[in-house]
Image (spheres, rainbow, N blue to C red):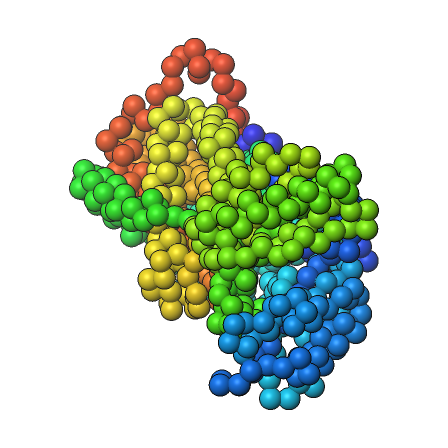
Amino acid sequence: MAILLYRLGRLSFRRRGRVVALWLLLLALLGGGAAVFSGPTTSKFSIPGTESQKAMDALSREFPQAGGATGSIVVAAPEGEKLTPAAVAPVTEEAAKVPGVLAAVDPFVSKAVSQDGRYALVQVQFDGVVDDITDAQREAFSEAGASAEGLRVEHGGEIMRGVPEIGSTEVIGVAVAALVLVLTFGSLVAAGMTLLNALIGVGAGMAGLFALSGTVELTSTAPILALMLGLAVGIDYALFITSRYRHYLAEGMDGEEAAGRATGTAGSAVVFAGATVVIALAGLAVAGVPFLTVMGLAAAATVALAVLVSLTLLPAVLGFAGVRVLPRKQRTPGGTPAAPAGAGFGFRWGRTVARLRIPVLVIGVVGLGALALPVQDMRLALPDAGTEAVGSPNREAYDLTTEGFGEGFNGRLVAVVSGDSAQATKAAAGETAALIQDTGGVLAVAAPQMNEKGTTALLAVIPETGPTAAATEETVHEIRDRVAGVAGASVALTGATAVGIDVSEKLADALPVYLLLVVGLSVLLLALVFRSLLVPLKAALGFLLTIGATFGITVTIFQEGRLADLVGLDTPGPLVSFLPILLIGILFGLAMDYEVFLVSRMREDFVHGADAREAVVSGVGHNGRVVTAAAVIMTAVFGGFVLMHDPIIKSIGFALAIGVLIDAFVVRMALVPALMHLLGRAAWWLPRPVDRVLPDLDIEGERLHREIPVQQKRVELVKT
């Protein structure tokens, strides 16, 4: 592996003009494809095969007029006054005239008026699904009722659901990354080159993703997740290889040789670090959730592209940069030499951890365990309008509905009764309505609505509690149990609330399988990389501490609401249902990144003759600065997404940022070297039968050093 990448790095360095031209051409082609073939994203979070989704599919076939998108208009009279049919009529009439609206129901006809007469709900049914609603339709809907003077009119429903957009908040993370790179390298050229290399890679990845969006259904969060990860790992991988390149230049190698060896050694670590991230993200497909599979594959493709860019484009750009990647004082043969071996904060930290290894392990494990305690109270659900930003249209409509009718009106359920004949369906619908009305937690059941054939009936069910309340989940399960025995027809419960419950349960069931698969494959990969059994097991156990503490902190802030103001969270609530499985996949990959970056140098020094404990100090000393800088950069990139208003993106960005901080600074920079010191040579033990079976991937470059010896004679650095 190291020799192959060594040759690739030298080739890219030598043919740098052609390599850069090819990447720019690819970027232009992908950008053109995105402009021509890109399609809209979707906000749907559904899972085929669940009861709620089967019911929705049946509605589309048998009751198409009820299978489209819905909206709601909440009308409120001034305090102390009551609504009248004449006052609300203009709102209903204007809503009915919105393009694509099948019907707008008068609340005085449907009896959707509060007991005090001050509030009314106008239900609006569209003929198309929510993803087919245009901005013009949405704008026309939001203006319905503008002529109703003296009344408060708010517009909500699924068609008003906000779609997260890529905006200026991401620039903050990039700016912080640029500052960290300048401080790390001491060279504007090295910092700018590293950042530009990553931006080209993520630009190509995002362009390719949008080019496919016309044929592949992308959720609205998929492009943002791909951007988040592609940018973070792109900068980190370029940082790691560039740091090794500068190290070889300082040892006296010429530019081409330094680029080749940096790509062969640090590049090998990048390949396997990237492979763990790709495995973790692609493994999301085992959950059997289409939208999560697409999110994982989109992000995995962007990460894979970041690896390819780092191995080819980066050596080419290094060739153009020449000696300018070094600090100004080190660019001439007689300039200020680099810091002597064994000096610097990284080496001092490595020796400190070696001396205090027992206290470091005890404090680290106990502290992370304490942070993980809130996980036992974690609740999951799909987000509803009640968690959207205060002041957004959907949130205003949600709050006004709650004020006038109670939270249950925001979490309506729909019972779909399907029979072979109109008579059987009618009888089953009546029985179903009675059973549901007698269920605890149900506020009201509307009269059945029949399709033209009379073979399908809809029953609107209003629970007493809100969409994400634990009591509502219990109500849904109790309703399903009660109606399971209805004779003469099939009964299925659906609606946004039921869909959210089904999605959460499906993901919870898939989580153990996913965790076992991802951790198992990645441990096997690390065993191949480091030719050790204890190092991969240690890496996996450290990750469990990371994920536990990360979940604990996220639950404390986003669910329990403590310190929520620090992240700009308006309303705490359950975590989004796909956050745990997504976070496990991403953080495991990133945790293994730092494990490979840090331990690969320990392994490299060990196989080249260093004492096992000296190799640990050397690994921390040489790569600790790079791992620290990489972690700060990743935290800044992820942290930039915390500033977005969308609660889903905000929670993902926060959890990733805090997870990276914990894993890099506590687990990898403290617990890992402390445990490696305790293990000594045993850390690299591998049974001989296993050693003979495993292929030698040569990530540490032992064969490279043996077959292509380093030229010790100092030569003048490449200048361009």
Query: How many labels, in total?
Result: 0
**In this picture, is 574 found above or below 4?**
below
Quadrant of the image occupied by residue 312: top right
**In this picture, is 344 found above or below 172?**
above
Quadrant of the image occupied by residue 274: top right
Residue sticking out furthest to the top: 689
Name the one closer to the observer, 157 or 46: 157
The quarter of the rendered structure image containing the N terminus is: top right
Q: Position of residue 93 (x, y in %)?
A: 75, 77
Q: Position of residue 38 (x, y in %)?
A: 76, 56
Looking at the image, which residue is at 77% across and 56% down? 65
Judged left or right of residue 35, residue 165 is: left
Is residue 242 in sight in this rendering? no
Judged left or right of residue 159, residue 362 is: left
Name the one closer to the observer, 178 or 497: 497
Is residue 83 in sight in this rendering? yes
Looking at the image, which residue is at 46% across and 46% down? 474
**In this picture, is 684 found above or below 658?**
above
Name the one closer to the observer, 161 or 13: 161
Name the one closer to the observer, 541 or 605: 541
Looking at the image, which residue is at 66% across and 45% down? 429
Looking at the image, which residue is at 26% across and 38% down? 674
Residue sticking out furthest to the bottom: 149
Judged left or right of residue 110, residue 570 is: left
**In this picture, is 108 found above or below 67?**
below
The quarter of the rendered structure image containing the C terminus is: bottom right
Q: Position of residue 47 (x, y in %)?
A: 62, 42
Q: Position of residue 655 (x, y in %)?
A: 43, 53
